[in-house]
Amino acid sequence: MKFDPDLVRELLLKVEAIPAGEMRVNDYFLIEGKPPKEILRHLQILIDAGFIQGSALVCMDGQIADVRADDLTYQGHQFLEAARSETAWKKVKGILREKGAGLTISVIQETLVKIATSAIGG
């Protein structure tokens, strides 16, 4: 499965929309055009990366059966604030593709911070 940064952003927005004290599982994260296995894997990546508080239920064969997402972590909120603007998001993806850089979470986040910093004159 290929890493999909647009799916990551969309999932973070969905987790952010969860009312306080509630948790969401599989059905809440269904996204048209995205296979459930891909969604579950990306949710697990976000948990492993420390962007989402939650847990993944992994079967004995290594397949992800379910993911529980409780909330964004501080790091998840920081990334999402930087990625919220559609304009900034598209700019980052364009810059990284132009330079041939990989679209990893950390590289995207660093580039988003640089864009935000330059936008405020830093």
Image (cartoon, rainbow, N blue to C red):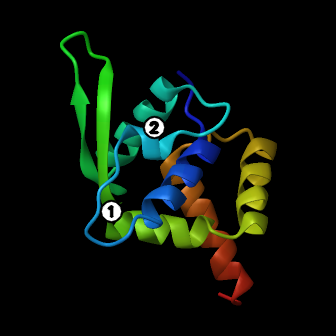
Q: Residue at x 69, y 71 (%)?
A: 115
Image disc number at residue 71: 1
Above or below 100: residue 86: below
Three-letter amino acid code of the residue under disc 2: His
Provide residue 71's location: percent of width, then percent of height. 33, 62
Q: Is residue 34 left or right of residue 24?
A: right
Q: Quadrant of residue 23?
A: bottom left
Provide residue 36's location: percent of width, then percent of height. 49, 28
Image disc number at residue 16: none
Q: Quadrant of residue 108?
A: bottom right
Above or below 102: residue 71: below
Residue corresponding to mark 2: 42
Provide residue 86's location: percent of width, then percent of height. 74, 64
Q: Residue at x 63, y 71 (%)?
A: 114
Quarter of the image containing the C terminus? Answer: bottom right
Q: Mark 1 or mark 2: which is in front?
A: 1
Provide residue 59's location: percent of width, then percent of height. 22, 18
